Image: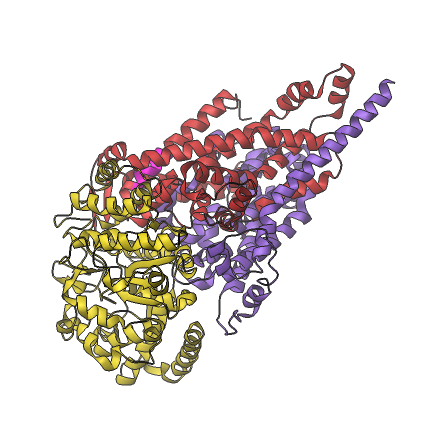
Amino acid sequence: MKRTGILVLVFTVVFVLAAGGLVSANSTKLTLWTFVHQHARFYQVMTEKWNALNPDRQIELEASVLPYEDMHNKLQIALQSGVGAPDIVDIEISKYPNFMKGVPQFVVLNDVFAPYVDDIVPSRLEIYARNGNMYGAPTHVGATVAYYYVEILEEAGVDYREIKTWDDFVEAGRKLKAVYPDKFMGIVETSAAWTVTAMLAQQGSDLVSDDDQPLIDTPEMLRAVTTLQEMVKEGLLTTCPDGQPDREGGKGLIDQGVVACVIMPQWFMSRYLDEIPNMNGKVAIAPVPVFEEGMPRSLGLGGTGTAITLTAADPDLASEWLAFAKLSEEGNRMIWEDLGFDPCNTALWTNTEMTHNPDNAYNQYFINNVFDVLNEIKDEIVMVRSSSISPAINDYVTTVMLNELFEDILDPAEVLEDAQYNIESQIF
Amino acid sequence: MRKRFAFLYDQKVAPYVFVLPFILTFLIFFLYPVLSTIQMSFQEILPGMISNVGFKNYQRLLGDRIFRTAITNSVLYTFWTLALLIPFPLVLACMLNSRSMMGRGFFKASLFLPVVTSVVVAGTIFRLMFGEVEGSLMNSLRALLGLSPIKWLKVRQTGFAAMVLMACWRWTGVNMLYYLSGLKGIPPEMYESADIDGANVWQKFWLISVPLVKPTIIYVLTISIYGGLAMFTESYMLWAGNSSPKNIGLTIVGYLYRQGWEQNRMGYASAVGLVLLAVAMLINLGQLRLTGVLGKELD
Amino acid sequence: MERTRNKDHSLLARVVLVAFFSILSLIVFVPFYAILLASFKPGEELVRYGLNLRLDWELMSFANYRYLFTGITRAGAYIAHDYLLWFKNSVVLTVVQTILTLLVSAWVGYGFAMYRFRGKNFLFTCVLLILMIPFEILMLPMYAQASSMGLLDSIWGIMLPYLAHATTIFFFRQYLTSIPRDIVDAGRVDGASEYGIFFRLVVPLMKPAMSAMAILVGMNSWNNFLWPMLVLRSGQKYTLAIGLNTLLTPYGNNYDILIAGACFSIIPVLILFLSAQKYFIEGMTMGSVKG
């Protein structure tokens, strides 16, 4: 797949160059910043489709891929100073609230989004909106699921489909340990809060309250981290290099086959395909375990909001292109087929011609079909809150708090109390 | 043409022409930024909205425990780099300078070599060497001693040690060269007459070498304090970003960067910067007074 | 009797010293050896299984270097990257910045060393002040300044604030005070202008000091990270240090080129140093140490 991806990229580049040479006469140049190579490729493909449909409004897209931190920092400064920002920009969800402070320097997209909004999961649009104004287009739902390494679980006498609650999960872990003392039931994150946030959502809580207060020292959080810490103490969960599955060290650990379960959003499928070759054909997808049956089994995590800056050369054209690229049915299909993400147009989830396409590389990699799972949990997918204080909370949780809990095994109650205090001292 | 600008050739005007580039740099890239930092530290700055908040940023700094961590880290890092990088290179320089030494040029070059690697490169090497996986260099060393692997960069002491070690690796050679150049200025007769008086190696070191290279020591001390307090890139590269577990590697500049660039709080970051300015001035002025440089006539 | 004992003593000292420095050099070499070895291994391997000193012949190949110089990846596809461009940018920046900084700073240093004028003490105190204040404190307003002057995303934006470089000015001033003023007076008698004296008589005398500073300024410029990262925007203009850092993104794996590129980037500075180290020590001896 990696190779085909590369070929696609090469062809795209060649094609775009060739096409650019042909149509450049009356095309408008738009600049775009993103921090993911695959996104840049996706946007180029969508631009070709746009150009085919709009012969009189040709677009020449200049997409630059910048490093994650660097891109967000530069965007912030560029917007602040009013010079140097691109026309279109991808913003990662955890950074997004920083751009909503003060007067958002983005174009309001309500009008161009109007034709599409009925098909799109509303909460995903809300994340990138403020006061009823939509400033960003979502990429995916990011429904959290569990990825099970079926082989080793079966060898330990565990049927992953039977794991419904965290108690089941612990039980399965013990069985696994009995057969494979050196393997682990799962990874506990120290530089990201995927699992913790999922556990909070199951209990109806979150990292931040509706009125923008940090929710750290809460009974729900205590229950979540204590459960995880107990599993760490028992050796069922392990921390990983780089602190989370979606980093080089984490993917390395999964690739070595020492982890029986990874709890990550749906988009992690694409990481399996591209960077975890050894697990090919060995992984099944299932809903995340819950504390008590009946609790919501998933929540949307991660994501990228794409916005048009106020300094864009042709904001109307850029906005319409954006709506087409990310919200149209065609765009949503590409989001699944090319990027491997669960599209926000959930009507597509039941389009079996698309979802169960046997030629799809993602479908081929996994034992079961991801959309079967997604449709099962569709109505249980909770959305995380995103507030202006979220970056400050995330920063503390993922650098200090989770490390104290799972690397240093400090007392959860004390860690949470400390964390609440420290985060409050950061918020103003 | 020449006539019109003839005044520039006047002996009274010429010195100002000479120092003009500095005056301009000072005004544009120093004085203005300092003043505007001071101004910004009393503001809250958001896109499209700037408001005066008085001393609020400073008040928040007082209660900000993460800022305290940053200060502690920076000061500790400075302390350790001074403790290791001031005396040891001097001893090494004296050894290299001794008459019994062979292959001086080679060793000089080889100890200097690390500093030619950029921090970006050195940080990447050290991060991988201190990796927590079993096969990393430092964990292989532990395995040789029969010890189990540890997570070097996730534990405060070892993470900090890695940072200091990297500084030593890079800067020992440079400081040694500074000292060597200082030692070169000492006439060999002084050591010879000390030999005749029956002085041992130790006495020669303390009574001749150290006092005579004192100006060099002060110079190295000054730049090391500066380097220590301003440290940022080393930590940034060692942890592949500005966030280290439990903020082990968070320095004052790192905190400034985090607040100003990552969290978009320019006003607050400016207050952080001014505190660093005060700390740097205080330590360096104190140091220069103690070592007797200040108060000397400037020609 | 006394003599032979001295001889034995110095022989022993010699052996001990050489042995000591050999061991020390070996330790210092370890990271170099590690990265050299690593540059021949697949990047993924390093991150997942650790950087070590093992020679795994099966894993090692020139694939990383092939990718570095031809853009042909391990998998055999062609993927363009900007490494060579970054390398060129870094070389250009370093050369231009070093030459200009030396000239401008020598110019200013000469003014401080050879003239008496009103405000001199005040201005020189300002030099010392800058010497002591980390630039990082001022990065926010300096960025705003560079932005309003239209210096962003250009090599001038990186260089301009540092051409009159406090450390270098300080050093040159110290160095020049040790040069007899008679030279200047003799020049005046011969009818040379103030500036003619500087260019024709003084600059040639400054060679050793210039070489010493060339190494320090050149090294700083080659390795400079934070300020260029803030100033530069487009990937085509990145320097090596920033470019290599961009390869460290959590999205997508670039370790192949990162390690080989890092290893290769050491070479130019190494050459610079080895060719100028003699002057470096000479220059340092005559400079700041007289303090």
Q: Is residue A56 above or below residue B173?
A: below
Q: Is residue A141 above or below residue B279?
A: below
Q: Specify the colour of chain A.
A: yellow
> What x and y, as percent, mark residue C130?
45, 36
Q: Nearer the viewer, residue B259 or B167?
A: B167
Q: Nearer the viewer, residue B160 or C129?
A: B160
Quarter of the image containing the C terminus of chain B? top right
Magenta segment, prevailing SS (helix, strand or loop): helix
Res A56 → quadrant: bottom left
> What x and y, as percent, mark residue B151?
43, 44
> What x and y, as percent, mark residue C233?
40, 59
Per the rendered image, the range of residues in magenta is B269-276
Q: Specify the colour of chain B.
A: red
Q: Is residue A267 above or below residue B270?
A: below
Q: Is residue A236 left or right of residue A424?
A: right
Can residue C205 be seen by looking at this rendering? no
The residue at the point 27 percent across, 37 percent down is A411
> What x and y, as percent, mark residue A102?
19, 52
Q: Is residue B90 above or below residue B112?
A: above
User: How many numbered discs, if any?
Assistant: 0
